[in-house]
């Protein structure tokens, strides 16, 4: 579903990206606070690790508290993104849904969403561990998992199967759209970091201040990217559902 109408089932990659862009532009300002909270939530375990006197420069921490925080932060992020997607879809359809209503709706669907998310992680782990390619296949199919969990009345396992059924006929187009979107996001992040570093160097800024500014801009860019990826997931789900 987009801000105007759903893309056709046979829509090309450019048409899907265009539809997602329209939805993104129409909902960015009202969904960005959710995305900022989601991105910041993911940083909670890293903030804990740095605050406790450690560094993230030597691989993944082998600390129980860190990983407990990481899983809790991931669950919170899934909840916030669910609320954001609920509001984004409502805005696309012209409905009036405030932040509180979106959060309450997300709370109602949270058990199913979390169970589906856990099952998805387990299936991806098995897929990547065994032959890699099954993991890649499932990863692309799961682009529509959250919309399926939120907007279709399926249990967690059936939602995973439904996601695969929806995306299998459109798998290559979905892969192309997500690769293009992620590449644009990475390029924007690197470009912004480079520009800020150059400006700070010209102005004689200190290293810590530069790092703080770069981190803040990076979080902002990734939050904007989160809104776009949510719009893309909704677009793919709408296009695939109309042909199912």
Image: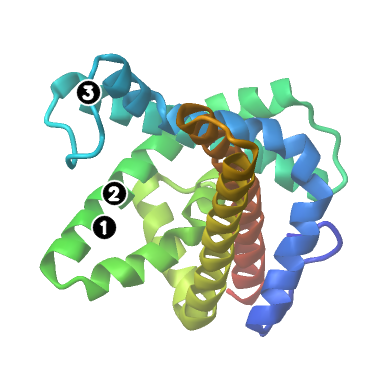
Query: Residue at the location (56% across, 72% down)?
Result: 180
User: Residue 54's mark?
Assistant: 3
Query: Which quarter of the image is occupied by the C terminus?
Result: bottom right
User: Residue 121's mark?
Assistant: 2
Element assignment for label 3: loop
Query: Residue at the location (24% across, 17% down)?
Result: 53
> In the image, is 83 to the left or to the right of 206?
right
Going from the N terminus, do you reach mark 1 or mark 3 first? 3
The residues bearing labels 3 and 2 have C-alpha atoms spaced at a distance of: 28 Å
**Residue 43 coordinates in the image, percent (x, y):** 41, 30
User: Residue 205's mark?
Assistant: none
- Reading the image, the residue beneath label 1 is 124
Report the number of numbered marks: 3
Element assignment for label 2: helix
Query: Residue at the location (65% across, 71% down)?
Result: 239
Q: Are marks 1 and 3 in contact (CB under 8 Å)?
A: no
The residues bearing labels 1 and 3 have C-alpha atoms spaced at a distance of: 30 Å
Q: Are marks 2 and 1 in contact (CB under 8 Å)?
A: yes
Up/down of 20 relative to 88, above or below:
below
Query: Which quarter of the image is occupied by the N terminus?
Result: bottom right
């Amino acid at each position: 579903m987009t801000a105007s109408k759903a893309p056709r089932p046979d829509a090309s990659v450019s048409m899907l990206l265009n539809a997602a862009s329209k939805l993104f532009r129409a909902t960015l300002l009202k969904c960005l606070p959710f995305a900022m909270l989601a991105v910041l939530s993911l940083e909670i375990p890293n903030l804990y690790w740095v605050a406790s006197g450690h560094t993230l420069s030597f691989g993944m921490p082998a600390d129980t508290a860190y990983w407990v925080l990481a899983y809790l932060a991931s669950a919170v992020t899934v909840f916030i993104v669910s609320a954001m997607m609920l509001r984004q879809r409502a805005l696309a359809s012209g409905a009036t849904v405030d932040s509180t209503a979106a959060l309450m709706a997300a709370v109602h669907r949270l058990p199913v969403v979390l169970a589906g998310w856990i099952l998805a992680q387990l299936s991806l782990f098995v897929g990547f561990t065994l032959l890699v390619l099954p993991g890649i296949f499932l990863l692309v199919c799961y682009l529509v998992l959250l919309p399926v969990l939120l907007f279709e009345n399926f249990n967690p396992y059936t939602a995973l199967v439904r996601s695969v059924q929806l995306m299998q006929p459109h798998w290559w187009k979905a892969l192309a759209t997500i690769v293009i979107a992620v590449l644009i996001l990475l390029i924007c992040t690197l470009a912004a970091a480079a520009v800020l570093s150059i400006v700070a160097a010209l102005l004689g800024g200190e290293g810590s201040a530069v790092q703080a500014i770069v981190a803040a801009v990076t979080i902002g860019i990734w939050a904007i990217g989160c809104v776009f990826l949510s719009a893309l997931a909704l677009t793919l789900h709408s296009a695939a559902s109309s042909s199912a």
